[in-house]
Image (tube, grey):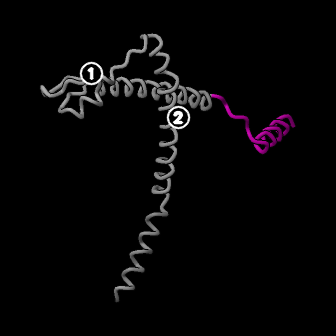
Amino acid sequence: MGVDDKGRRMLKEFREFAMKGNVVDLAVGVIIGAAFGAIVNSLVGDVIMPMIGAVTGGLDFSNYFTPLSKAVTATNLADAKKQGAVLAWGSFLTLTINFIIVAFVLFLVIRAMNTLKRKEEAAPSKPSAEVELLTEIRDVLKKS
């Protein structure tokens, strides 16, 4: 068996692996997840955070920091990072708050989807035309 045969066999095995249902399903899930993530991020960043900013008077923690060096004299985070080591706790706090908001929004969306799913499952489905016809035939036969 030559190197060429091993290469072809490996390529064939890879193709079979890549075309299995679970790999394709996973790829579709990742793509949809990324698109859904963009929607949730936009909802949080463009809708919810501006409302929170309006209520709190535009409070923004992202520029809060603690200098770790005496050389840091800047008053904003970007300049302070250029001057030396800083503990950017405001950025961490902002990201943590954003995470909590995103997680809560996702919770609400998934909860709403589960509620809709339960309603669909609870609603009795209409019998098919064949079942209705068979029921009518049964009822006619019972009367005879």
Residue bounds of the magenta highlight: 123-144
In the rendered image, residue 28, in percent from the top left (x then y), is placed at 51, 50
In the image, taking residue 16 as reference, residue 120 lies left or right, namely: right
Q: Amino acid at mark 2?
A: Ile
Assign the C terminus to one quadrant of the image: top right
Tell me whether the residue at label 2 lies in contact with that at label 1, contact meaning CB atoms closer than 8 angstroms.
no
| Secondary structure type for disc 2 | helix
Q: Is residue 137 magenta?
A: yes
Q: Quadrant of the N terminus?
A: bottom left
Residue occupying the point 52% across, 44% down: 32
Between 99 and 17, the one lying in front of the other is 99
* Overall secondary structure of the magenta section: helix
- Looking at the picture, how far across and down is residue 99, in whole percent? 37, 28
Question: Going 60% across and 32% down the picture, which residue do you hit?
Answer: 121
Question: Disc 1 on helix, strand or loop?
Answer: loop
Mark 2 vs mark 1: which is more N-terminal? 2
Q: Is residue 77 shown above or below 6?
A: above
